[in-house]
Image: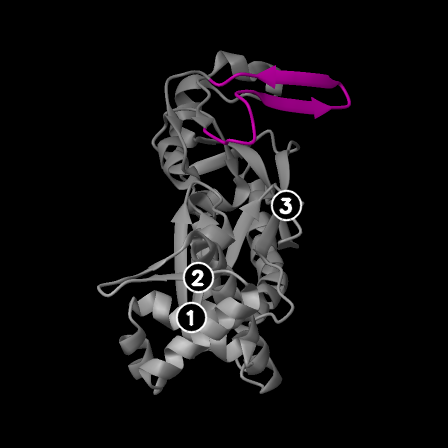
């Protein structure tokens, strides 16, 4: 018995809901399709399909077996393509997810990747949560700060980020410029909603530790929007450095307390662990490992330039 052939036939019958439709799709006779499914049932010693004169439905055993059969067939196809060299050149759809705020970096990087690999259709999704790559069909998830211990996933480190204190020149002219973290409670501090962290900003140096709790005048969950609120003079904010470099260059925002970096975190590329890694996933991750640190270094050179400090 050809187990692969029998499984493929069963999956096609389950998909089409008909022995006749499956036979037409597989270029077999209806009798051959019926026999192949029966051979599989005999092999498994379990009935997979409930047959009546009007319809075909999956049994409980069939419902359990169908997703596993599909996965086994997909794995076999992937292995076959790999052996035949089909994955040497990246092609097809690459589905990448990133947090909203990090899109300011992912967008130019994805554009450069597409120039290098024109046969790849790049699909970038931005949201405020980290999805499960397997459940939602993402090839790569860009995650900040969390390393998954699940053996189903590979967590490839691709960069590091941190946050800096910023304000607009207009706000500082009206309210004065704090020169030390201990002076921040006298100012309007805005809160970027950041799930891994609580309300407080915690500063630390050789002279001690200071805890600042942002007020409730303005809160936002997207770094770029908070940067615009800071530019508008609403108050002082704590923002990922890559979110404020444009505003620093333009002179609408300045960095405060330049010797302090808060909330340092790692950036990871998460992807399902596979024996045969698709070329588009491998080339994208390899591209990120080289290009993202360079882009972050360019951004970091701006926030560390004392010309943009106050």
Report the residue that reaches farthest toward the right: 206
Circle 2: element type? loop
- Mark 3–mark 1 distance (CA, rounded to whole Å): 36 Å
Above or below residue 37? Residue 55 is above
Q: Position of residue 293 (x, y in %)?
A: 62, 57
Q: Position of residue 47 (x, y in %)?
A: 46, 61
Q: Position of residue 112 (x, y in %)?
A: 47, 69
Q: Position of residue 93 (x, y in %)?
A: 42, 69
Q: Which residue is mark 1?
A: 10
**Of callouts 3 and 1, the N-terminal one:** 1
Left or right: 79 as drawn, with respect to 37:
right
Above or below residue 214? Residue 283 is below
Q: Which residue is rendered at x = 25% and y = 63% of the image?
A: 55
Q: Do the residues under discs 2 and 1 have CB atoms within 8 angstroms?
A: yes
Image quadrant where residue 193 sits:
top left
* Other-residue count near label 2 (Cα within 10 Å), few / some / many at <14 / 14–19 / ≥20: many
**Of callouts 2 and 1, the N-terminal one:** 1
Residue 88 visible? The answer is: no
Q: Which residue is rendered at x = 63% and y = 62% of the image?
A: 289
Residue 271 or residue 102, whichever sits in front? 271
Q: Which mark is residue 148?
A: 3
Q: Which mark is residue 48?
A: 2
Residue 239 or residue 39, whichever sits in front? 39
- Mark 2–mark 1 distance (CA, rounded to whole Å): 9 Å
């Amino acid at each position: 018995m050809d187990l692969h052939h029998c499984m493929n036939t069963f999956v096609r019958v389950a998909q089409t809901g008909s022995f006749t439709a499956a036979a037409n799709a597989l270029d077999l006779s209806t009798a051959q399709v019926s026999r192949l499914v029966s051979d599989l049932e005999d092999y498994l010693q379990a009935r997979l399909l409930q047959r009546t004169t009007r319809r075909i439905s999956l049994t409980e055993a069939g419902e359990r077996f169908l997703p596993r059969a599909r996965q086994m067939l997909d794995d076999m196809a992937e292995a076959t393509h790999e052996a035949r060299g089909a994955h040497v050149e990246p092609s097809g759809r690459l589905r990448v997810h990133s947090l909203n705020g990090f899109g300011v970096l992912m967008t130019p990087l994805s554009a450069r990747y597409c120039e290098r690999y024109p046969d790849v259709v790049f699909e970038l999704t931005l949201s405020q949560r980290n999805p499960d790559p397997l459940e939602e069909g993402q090839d790569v998830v860009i995650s900040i700060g969390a390393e998954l211990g699940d053996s189903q996933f590979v967590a490839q480190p691709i960069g590091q980020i941190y946050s800096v204190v910023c304000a607009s020149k207009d706000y500082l002219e009206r309210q004065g410029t704090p020169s030390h973290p201990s002076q921040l409670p006298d100012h309007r501090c805005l809160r970027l909603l950041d799930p891994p962290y609580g309300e407080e900003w915690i500063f630390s140096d050789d002279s001690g530790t200071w805890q600042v709790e942002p007020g409730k005048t303005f809160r936002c969950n997207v770094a770029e929007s908070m940067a615009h609120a800071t530019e508008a003079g609403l108050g002082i904010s704590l923002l990922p450095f890559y979110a404020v470099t444009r505003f620093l260059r333009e002179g609408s925002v300045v960095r405060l307390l330049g010797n302090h970096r808060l909330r340092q975190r790692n950036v990871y590329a998460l992807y399902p662990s596979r024996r045969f890694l698709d070329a588009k996933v491998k080339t994208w991750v390899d591209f990120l490992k080289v290009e993202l640190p360079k882009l972050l270094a360019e951004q970091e050179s701006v926030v560390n330039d004392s010309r943009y400090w106050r």
